Amino acid sequence: MNIFIITAPYQVLNAIEARNYFSLSDNNLIILNIGFFQKDAFQEILDKTNWDSIKFIDFFYRFADRDFGESPPKNSYEKLIEFFMILDQIIKKQKINRLCRAYKAVDNLFLGNYLIDHDLFMRHIANNIHFNRLYLLDVGTDTLRINYQRLQENITKLAQLNIDISCKVLDSNKVSIGSFIINNFKKKLRKHLIDWNVSGVKSLTYFTCYRFEVNGSDDRITNKFEYLRSLLKNTENSGEIWFLGQPLVDQEYITSEVFMSFMKKIKLYFNNENIHYVLHPRESDKWINILKKDVNFEVKKFQNPIEYEILFSKKNPKIVVSFFTSALETCSIIYGDKVDFFAIFLPTHLLLKSKNIVEQVYNNLMLNYNNVRVISLL
């Protein structure tokens, strides 16, 4: 039995590629519906004949914009929010534990994420389902972050173990036996009811379009999108220019001023031609009016992954442009020279975070993708 556990429509396409690449049978798809995407967005690209079972599990993110971190709630309202967040987490963990018990042992486990700072339930699943091999489906640029995090895990594992042992010795000397027992009970209760088991697995295999050196005993298999390419039809060229949006401002990669400056430069670079801005699913709608009014962009908003939209449309765009979205890689692999691809270079001094990851993406594009032109507008 093979289990695919995903949370986003674009991961359906990667799951389909993996299923065909490995020529697997007895394939079961589990979609955790986190509420960021309409259920129809999954249904439209699912071919039920290719899966032995498809199961949706409601897993809505509530209070997604609230994170108290190390700062405790300041008032009664925030305490109430914190209470409901804890309750919601308990319910989520129960759902995941039931899922793990239902599929206690599988041949291959395919996960849609493995970040140490997001979607932690994926790591919990990997630690509670016995598998012969764990695969990580492509998650865009987060794949590079995961590989980097895996490296950091190995480096700090032994050091952290020594620190934990030291802290336990110090704590037992500072607190009374009663307090120690109570605190220990609280930790065990929280571990049992709330916290995810996020410890790293011994090894995993990336199924990705990115090329990078893996960490330790991990492995990497190149996803060449052979199945999707086999579906490519002879379509007409629409003559349109599409800019693939990314939530760069929303996720604090760049400032809004830098973003707007580049969008104006992009308009000039393409001689003020009509450019269609394809809004990213996690991108704020506020950019729609700004781009229409200030930069004179047309705005498109698709329900399905961009790769699917182009693949099954009657007409291909003439040009696809973006900054460093993974859709540039995937689309360039699928469509080859049928479409012209441009990556707009963002220099590191304008980035607010993840500078090494972004730099790695651009280097990967320049070294491995001859049909993607990386251009600087500064």
Image (cartoon, rainbow, N blue to C red):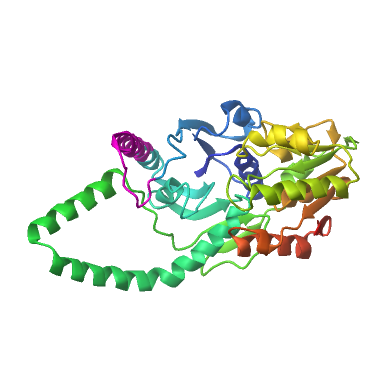
Tell me which residue sits at (64%, 34%) in the image.
286
Image position, residue 136 (x, y; %): 55, 52
Image position, residue 337 (x, y; %): 87, 50
Q: Look at the image and tell me in which quarter the C terminus lies.
A: bottom right
Secondary structure that dominates the magenta span = helix
Looking at the rendering, the stretch of residues picked out in magenta corresponds to 68-95
Image position, residue 245 (x, y; %): 70, 43
87 drawn magenta: yes
| 200 is higher (above) or lower (below) than 3 | below
Image position, residue 188 (x, y; %): 22, 51
Tell me which residue sits at (32%, 33%) in the image.
77
From the viewer's side, name the closer residue of 363 and 122.
Answer: 363
On the question of residue 24 being in view, the answer is yes
Which residue ends up furthest to the top in the rendered image? 40
376 drawn magenta: no
Q: Quadrant of residue 359?
A: bottom right
Q: Quadrant of residue 338?
A: top right
| 116 is higher (above) or lower (below) than 64 | below
Asked if residue 298 lies left or right of residue 110, the reply is right
Asked if residue 172 lies left or right of residue 211, the reply is left
Q: Quadrant of residue 26?
A: top right
Tell me which residue sits at (25%, 72%) in the image.
166
From the viewer's side, name the closer residue of 45 and 142.
Answer: 142
Asked if residue 117 lies left or right of residue 240, the reply is left
On the question of residue 311 being in view, the answer is no
Asked if residue 22 lies left or right of residue 315, the reply is left
